[in-house]
Amino acid sequence: MSAWPARSRKLAALSTALLALLVAAAPAMAELQARVKVAPGQSLALLARRYGCTIGALQRANGLRTVTIHPGQTLAIPVCGGRPAAATTGPAPSAPRRAAIARKPATSQPKVRVGQSRGQPWRGWLYKPTRLAEGDGYLLRRPERTYGCAHVVATIEAAIAQVRATHPELHTLAIGDLSAARGGWLNEHASHQSGRDVDLGFYYRHVPPGYPQAFAKATAENLDYAATWDLLVAFARTADAPLGVQAIFLDYGVQGMLYEWAKARGVDERYLDRLFQYPNGKWSSGLVHHEPYHDDHLHIRFKCPPRDRACR
């Protein structure tokens, strides 16, 4: 009897064992909640606490054999099951409650002020609104239209601060309209009447002419994908929170640009399919909805505060 079959069986067993070892050693292709650039003084343990992960989960997601990380290094942050610690740089995600793509902010929940938003976004008004003040890293295009609910203003400020902490060299972001001081009809808009909507520009690799005083159309050549993705996710991860985002409106083509960019960088397709309508069609489900003429900005709509009967 030939020894070849026995040798073949040994080689097959060895190949199987080697493949299993390689699979076990490969970093997990986890659903990602963010990509962060390590800042001076940050440790893997600190980032794990901030994002509600274990150190081991961060090591597996990034293929790290030790806990050593370096300033300027970019880390993938998977969706983890822990509760994030409080952070001073804005929202960080918590465990998902349903099949949601959004996470609770790591900071304390924004202060609830019941009764500010009256009626509906397309037929409503404001009572004793909160004004978005001028701040670092953004320009208010029309300051007379920067009134909204307290939780809307707080989340905008926190999200921008978080993105700028990850990308400290970013240019100034354009902030468009929220609502007028008393709400109600606002020219150029079908909504923005009750303090729950805000328009935000994108981040670009090279600042377009006229920006941030005016919005600029996103193209494959000029869009800063990483910073714009982080801005989008900073809002999207709040969608499960009582005061979080209700919907985001964005041109279908720009959705596709961000979808393909994130997919190529290892973001889980299941996450992307819950976030975007792309590539399933403009009438499919997703937190981000197609809206015509929204290829130069994000339109973000927030929920009503719980038990606020005036807000609809």
Image: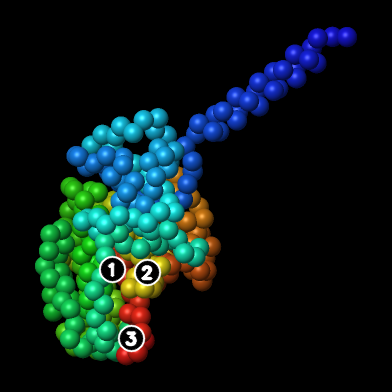
179 left or right, relative to 32: left
Dot 3: element: loop
Q: Could you tell me residue 91's position as x and y percent?
A: 29, 59
64 left or right, relative to 71: right
Please tell me which of labels 2 and 1 falls first in the chain: 1
Q: Residue at x 42, y 43 (%)?
A: 57
> How far is disc 2 from disc 1 in space, using C-alphas?
9 Å
Q: Residue at x 35, y 89 (%)?
A: 309
Please tell me which of labels 2 and 3 falls first in the chain: 2
Is 294 situated above or below 34?
below
Dot 2: element: loop
Quadrant in the rendering for residue 149: bottom left
Q: Residue at x 16, y 62 (%)?
A: 138
- Whether residue 155 appears in this view of the structure is yes
Quadrant in the rendering for residue 151: bottom left
Quadrant of the snapshot with the C terminus: bottom left
Q: Residues within 10 Å of mark 1 (few under 14, many from 20)?
A: some
Q: Which mark is residue 109?
A: 1
Look at mark 3 in the image and give the residue it sits on.
308
Q: Report the front residue among 174 and 111.
A: 111
Q: Tag 2: residue type?
A: Ala
